[in-house]
Image (cartoon, rainbow, N blue to C red):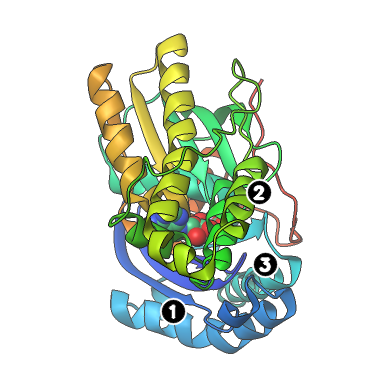
Amino acid sequence: MLILGIETSCDETSAAVVRDGREILSNVILSQLIHSGYGGVVPELASREHLRSIIPVYREALAKAGIAESDIELVTATYGPGLVGALLVGLNFAKGLAYGNDIPFVAVNHLEGHIAANFLIHHDLPVPHLTLIISGGHTSLVLVNSFGDYRILGQTKDDAVGEAYDKVAKLMGLGYPGGAAIDRLAQSGNRNFFRFPRGVAREESFDFSYSGLKTAVALYMQKLTPLELEKNKADIAASFQEAAVEVLVNKAVRAATELNIETVTLSGGVASNSRLKELMQEAMREIGGKFYFPPPSLCTDNAAMIAAAGYFRYKMQGASDLAVNAVPYLKLVSSQ
Ligand code: KG4
Ligand code: ZN
């Protein structure tokens, strides 16, 4: 089955063609650059950019996959969570396409899309497994019993880990979004330069907290002269990063041990982080577990993961009603 995926929940306009939820024929991702000067995504600008780009991005996805519109057998699109105006562009485009061509449509939860990225690329992915959904808007530790059957073990009580990266990057003048820039800068820094607080929420819970870490970095930077700041920028980035990722690794590994789960996966934009992958790899090796993560193009928001999730949902419960609306605060819920 040839599936079209559409993703416009935030600042990436993406269209993809995936065969049977497992084989990517194309995955076109246009990251909106317009927000970089604002230090964050400007919702109205995001909607306008999606409107401008959705048709060219869709056409490119078809061309790269070497298929015609009439070859599409299932249309899928993100309906939440995300910015309502941004979601509406992709969702309405997808619904119109499905209606006009009389093909089934499936509305996809963006978070389930991130979970699907690992199923899409790792055909031997074991279940049950634990996944950390870590992005600019989310930080959750989820037990995936099977695709569609989840238990939310913990989530952030305040900022998302990607948000902390972006805010620290802004303080350092690294632009928006700044996660990847901090990752790069940290590679030449000393990660033991300063010990920033590990935001653990409650030690015994699987919840997270990142606002304290962000504030600690801001306060630390305020005390430095511009010259000191410039000299130690890489060290501060590396020290911040160590605090940010250590908590993720510790909680995921503790959950794996306590629940007796062998496999941990990463998903979402922060899953590209090099230090996180390194530490997780080491920790999972120590406990004799397995560790999976998607390639960078499937970590950041992309339509291939949406197409895969939509296909798996279609197999489970058929098509969605075309009356489905965008749900900005859509959650991933635990099964009973
Ligand atoms: O999944 P995503 O594209 O969008 C959301 O659903 O939020 O994630 C974007 C987030 C941003 O906060 C970005 O700074 C962060 O992922 N990010 C990274 C890296 N690459 C992207 N954070 C840390 N290290 C990276 N290499
Ligand atoms: Zn995302």
Residue 323 screen position, x and y as percent = 76, 61
Q: Which of 287 and 222 is in front in this view?
A: 222
- Kindly tell me whether mark 1's CB lies below 8 Å from ligand 2: no
Which residue is labeled 2 in the image?
A: 215
**Residue 87, disc:** 3
Determine the CA span between mark 3 and mark 1.
22 Å
Residues marked 3 and 1 touching at CB (< 8 Å): no
Q: Position of residue 233 (x, y in %)?
A: 42, 61
- Residue at (60%, 43%) from the top-left corner? 213
Image coordinates for residue 91, horizontal then vertical, percent: 65, 68
Look at the numbered disc 3 and give the secondary structure of its residue: helix
Closest to the observer, 335 or 158? 158
Residue at image position (58%, 51%) is 220
**Which residue: 56% across, 35% down?**
197
Q: What amino acid does circle 3 point to?
A: Leu
Quadrant hosting residue 69 = bottom left
Q: Does the residue labelled 3 lie within 8 Å of ligand 1?
A: no
- Element on which disc 1 rests: helix
Q: What type is the residue that disc 1 sits on?
A: Glu
Residue of label 1: 69
Q: Nearer the viewer, residue 97 or 233?
A: 233
Local SS, label 2: helix
For marks 1 and 2 on the same chain, the one whose residue lies earlier in the sequence:
1
Q: CA–CA distance between discs 2 and 3? A: 31 Å
